[in-house]
Amino acid sequence: MAKRIDVKSLDIYYGGFHAVEDVSMTVEPRTVTAFIGPSGCGKSTLLRTLNRMHEVIPGAHVKGSVQLDGTELYGQSVDPVAVRRVVGMVFQRPNPFPSMSIFDNAASGLRLNGVKNKGVLADAVERSLTAANLWNEVKDRLGKAGMGLSGGQQQRLCIARAIAVEPQVLLMDEPCSALDPISTLAIEDLIGELKEKYTVVIVTHNMQQAARVSDQTAFFNLAAQGKPGRLIEIGPTEKIFSNPDEKATEDYITGRFG
Amino acid sequence: MSATTNDAQLTLRRPGGVRTVKNALATVYVTVVTVLAIVPLAWVLYTVITKGIRLILSSDWWLQSQRGITPRREGGGAYHAIVGTVEMALICAAIAVPLGILGAILLIEYAKGTKVARGVSFMVDVLSGIPSIVAALFIYALFITIFGFGRSAIAVSCALVLLMLPVVLRSTEEMLKLVPQELREASYALGVPKWKTIVRVVIPTAFSGITTGVMLGVARVMGETAPLLILVSYAVGINFSPTSDTMGALPTMINSGRDQAPQLPGYERVWAAALTLIIIVMLLNLLARLIARASKLKEK
Amino acid sequence: MAVTDTDATERVEPEPVATEDPTLSPVVDHGGMHMHTPVPEVMHHNHRAPAPATIDHAERGPRGVKLAKISKTGDRVFRTMAITSGLVIVLLVLFVGIFLLALALPSLQADQDNFLTSRNWTVVGNELRFGIVGLLWTTVLTSLLAMAIAVPVSVGVALCLTQYLHKRASGPVSFVVDLLAAVPSIIFGLWGLIVLGPFLAPAAEWLISKLGWIPLFSRNVDPKGSVFVASVVLAIMMLPIVTAISRDVFAQTPRDQIEAALALGATRWEVIRTAVLPYGRSGVISASMLGLGRALGETIAVMIILTTPPAGSPFTPSIFAGGETFASKIANNASEFDSPSKTGAFIAAGLVLFLVTFAVNAMARVIADRGGAKS
């Protein structure tokens, strides 16, 4: 199910502003890739181009190519909505839909895209909540409001919501930064399990987290204030954190800046 | 207040003389004025209730019309007026609510920050400043002078739309602004198109606030008299047809009887009609506020 | 909604699963750091048949992803609906202005008096003589007097709610004042005429006896039906709006300005005078103008309370006289719109009212924006 991602010479613009410059990278299926770097260097921006979420902001556009197993996501007649049905996303702050119950939240991706069969929905909800390690905690109160859960549980609900539609790739934008350490650890464990089925790309400002959960790490940085962000180095996590090629990477890892 | 004569010691006294007096005067003024502000509501309610309660407690009041009743005769009820008021308000709402909600959606979901949004917003502001009599005159000019229709209850409803639309639009706009952008993004990330996101995620999230705005709008137009004076004739009998040129309504029921001498039975009916109107309007207001408060608590 | 890999059976090589490859070190479990074994550096796969550069239907590569065809109709329809309602609103407002003007013009042109300076109002028959001076005077007088009463009271109440009262008490009091706005104006009119009028009569008498030599306070009609009573009722009706906005403005006085005043040892009144009122000044002015706009357009309460002077009566500036405002004149004659020229005269009056309220509301908004205090 999971697919590989090929990014080729991608430039990202917000209107006239050049936000990210010339990124090329490959993400293998069923692996976790972490994007790290100081704030404002474009890692979240790049992540959002992988499911064309950046286009929510008027004037945002890209040059270059992003391919999912050879299928060009930025093709002539490709609708961003279609892309988002195969590439899922989990956000920084848990955002379950307030007007829906836990069950409805988990099922929302399917329901909103036309699935009505109650049996199918119930199965999908159980499957995704189990995969998100939330099933046992909520199975007796599926009808209760999604907002009534704790922060960590809400985030796992959002993860369940994203995987219920069985995407090819799961994007996670600093998923733990709004959570306490215990919930963070729970989610990191979860990522380790998720990668058995999905290709995961995670943006994190927490280097230790990147080192813990990812197979491949990409380090981004700004050339200078006001310049676009660039991919400085990408490689196996162990290498990046023990003997990176670029000096800038090493400076960042060792805390000399950022 | 401590008195001290030794300069070496710290003097901790209230600021003396004039400053204290001014402060006290300010406090007195503010208190008096606040009490003064509460008095009118209490007084009006008291007046209306004491003068009107006797009649509205009888079931006849709610079930009968004024057909065949003259000011000198007892009896009859306000059924025709209640029905008329509610009917005209509902027809108005049927037009104003979708227009208002869609307009707010335009301003917040599709055109936020653009010149188009500024222009439409400006027009809504103008609309909200139009006095009810001017709105009624416009509909008169449009329907009756130009199109040649006669007076009708629908004309009244259309005039009321001009009054209700800004209320619904502005309150919906405020509610939509409160929906966090992240919710929309969560929906987009699931591959849900924009229109479905608005209809199935944003609006349900804002729903209770929108309902509150609608109820307040309805309460407002139920009390409007000017359009009734200009656009329809007051009927004493029951008439449900919105296209006929007569229709009973509570404000005109009050207005038609207000010149009567206090000894006549008709006089008391005027106050009872006033009480009926206030009850309906106040109930809607209180209900709307309750809904608003309940939904605020839910989010905590 | 699973997107299936339709070429699943044709995989060339199995995907490396990191945990089962014996050549890589095993995953270290909980306790220490999670160090996953790295996936080997990946070289480019050789695609059997590279996907052509441009594919327009159901984009898919050889082992690619099927991207659904998304129907655009929903978005298009909905967007059109939203734009249409915006258009309707804009047109509505424009039409109000245009229609009123169009229908008023013929009567204005046939008017034999000067519209802006005449006090007459003869609109029957062929001779049209009408002018708005009398209406203007009464409208302005009632509204200004109402403002003079309402604004000091509203500011006082707003100050009380934000600076004097505890949060728990200010809620209910706020609620009561706001509820005043819910009372329909016809009920205010009825109450004003029958209850308030007689109540204020002694006060009116007293004023007349003391100050009757000033034309403004000279005796005229029965005080019940006078500008004085109408103004008080208008003031009551203005109260909720002015109070609510002033309250919001005062509540937003920056904390540090208040604390600076307190730190200087100021009394509560002095804090208000130096921090709250200056900050809120433009907001209060804006609120007053919005209240003024409301008072100008108020129809029914004024219609019920004010005694209509007989045609041709002499002008008197007294606040104890009757009169007609723009709004009440139109309402008083509502059943008599039988001829176009007659209707046109009233519409002309309505047009003036529309323009005046528009100007007042616009000014209120400009002042609010300039002032900076957000309400």
Image: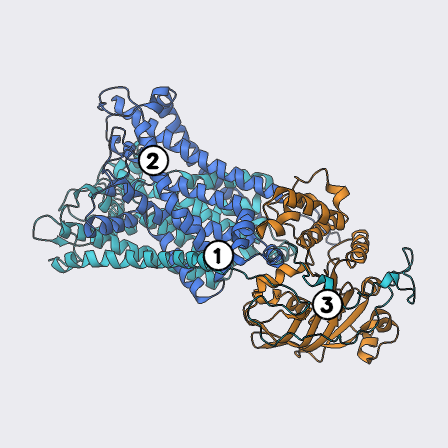
Q: Colour of chain A?
A: orange
What is the three-letter code of the residue carrying label 3? Arg
Number of the label disc, if any, that sits on residue C74: 1
Q: Nearer the viewer, residue B168 or A195?
A: A195
Q: Can you give x and y, in whole percent of width and height, for residue C191 in the image?
A: 33, 33
From the image, which quarter does the N terminus of chain B lie in?
top right
Residue A8 falls left or right of residue C326: right
Tell me the subunit letter for badge 1.
C
Q: Which chain is cyan?
A: C
Q: Is residue C53 above or below residue C141?
A: below
Of circles 3 and 1, which is in front?
3
Q: Can you give x and y, in whole percent of width and height, for residue B252 in the image?
A: 28, 35
Rounded to the nearest angstrom, the CA distance separating label 1 from label 2 is: 37 Å
Residue that carries the numbered disc 2 in the rendered image: B85
Label 2 element class = helix
Q: Can you give x and y, in whole percent of width and height, for residue A143 in the image?
A: 65, 39
Q: Is residue C246 above or below residue C55?
A: above
Query: Do tags 3 and 1 sit on the same chain?
Result: no
Task: Judge whether residue A185 can be spotted in this image.
Answer: yes
Q: Can you give x and y, in whole percent of width and height, for residue A230 in the image?
A: 71, 77
Q: Are dots 1 and 2 in contact, CB under 8 Å?
A: no
Q: Colour of chain B?
A: blue
Q: How packed is label 2: few (under 14 Cα within 10 Å), some, or many (20 or more)?
A: many
Q: How packed is label 1: few (under 14 Cα within 10 Å), some, or many (20 or more)?
A: some
Rounded to the nearest angstrom, the CA distance separating label 2 from label 3 is: 65 Å
Q: Is residue C322 above or below residue B101?
A: above
What is the three-letter code of the residue carrying label 2? Thr
Q: Residue C55 lies in what quarter of the image?
A: bottom right
